[in-house]
Image (cartoon, rainbow, N blue to C red):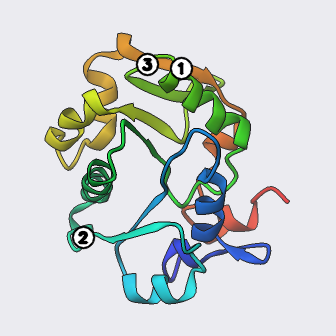
């Protein structure tokens, strides 16, 4: 993308600031933003709300799972009982999708994932009981490994097409919903 995805624009805000505001909702005690590449620049330019805990993942070059680990460390320090993993490059997630994942976790699900047309989307929710498995997952398999280990414990909640929109290239950004 030529720079940090967190700084891509969504209207008057950045992808990161939008995600932080989207996740700051009933049922979410704390929002943690994990920064990697160009962390100082992102922190300075993204417009992250003051109530968001910002964590810098110094191991970001090793892969996205290291950011998950950094987020888990922060969630643990904050006394969290579950986490929502929401990549910054999925900016169009609807609040109804987030609420469905939160509802499943609140109802006792160990793992909750929004699905649309048979495909898993974001954000994925993981109860604290699953965090050791996320910490033990291989770097090349990431959280997907945890989902595949015991698929019977994954609760699929209805998600709209919004849960699947991933912005990885300039073409993706150009095709984004308006």
Please identify the quarter of the rendering in which residue 89 is found. Answer: bottom right
Badge nearest the viewer, 1 or 2: 1
Q: Residue at x 20, y 64 (%)?
A: 62
Residue 21 is situated, as x and y percent measured from the top left of the image, at: 65, 60
The numbered mark, 3 or 1, whose residue comes first in the sequence reads 3
Q: Residue at x 24, y 70 (%)?
A: 61
Q: CA distance from mark 3 to mark 2?
A: 32 Å
Q: Relative to residue 156, is residue 8 drawn left or right?
A: right
Please identify the quarter of the rendering in which residue 50 is found. Answer: bottom right
State yes or no: discs 3 and 2 in contact (Cβ < 8 Å).
no
Residue denoted by label 1: 156
State yes or no: discs 3 and 1 in contact (Cβ < 8 Å).
no
Q: Relative to residue 68, is residue 95 drawn left or right?
A: right
Of 171 and 117, the residue lying toward us: 117
Q: CA distance from mark 1 to mark 2?
A: 31 Å
Label 3 neighbour load within 10 Å: few <14, some 14-19, many 20+: some
Residue denoted by label 2: 61
Disc marking residue 86: none
Residue denoted by label 3: 109
Q: Residue at x 49, y 56 (%)?
A: 31
Above or below: residue 143 compared with residue 51: above
């Amino acid at each position: 993308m030529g720079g940090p995805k967190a700084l891509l624009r969504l209207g008057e805000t950045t992808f990161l600031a939008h995600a932080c505001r989207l996740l700051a909702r009933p049922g979410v005690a704390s929002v943690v933003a994990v920064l990697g590449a160009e962390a100082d620049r992102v922190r300075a330019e993204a417009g992250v709300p003051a109530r968001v805990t910002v964590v810098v993942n110094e191991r970001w070059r090793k892969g996205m799972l290291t950011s998950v680990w950094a987020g888990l460390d922060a969630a643990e320090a904050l006394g969290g009982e579950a986490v929502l993993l929401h990549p910054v490059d999925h900016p169009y997630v609807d609040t109804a999708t987030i609420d469905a994942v939160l509802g499943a976790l609140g109802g006792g699900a160990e793992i909750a994932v929004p699905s649309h047309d048979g495909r898993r989307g974001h954000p994925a929710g993981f109860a604290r009981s699953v965090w050791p498995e996320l910490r033990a997952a291989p770097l090349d398999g990431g959280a997907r490994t945890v989902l595949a280990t015991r698929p019977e414990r994954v609760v699929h909640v209805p998600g709209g097409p919004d849960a699947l929109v991933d912005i990885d290239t300039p073409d993706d950004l150009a095709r984004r919903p308006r």
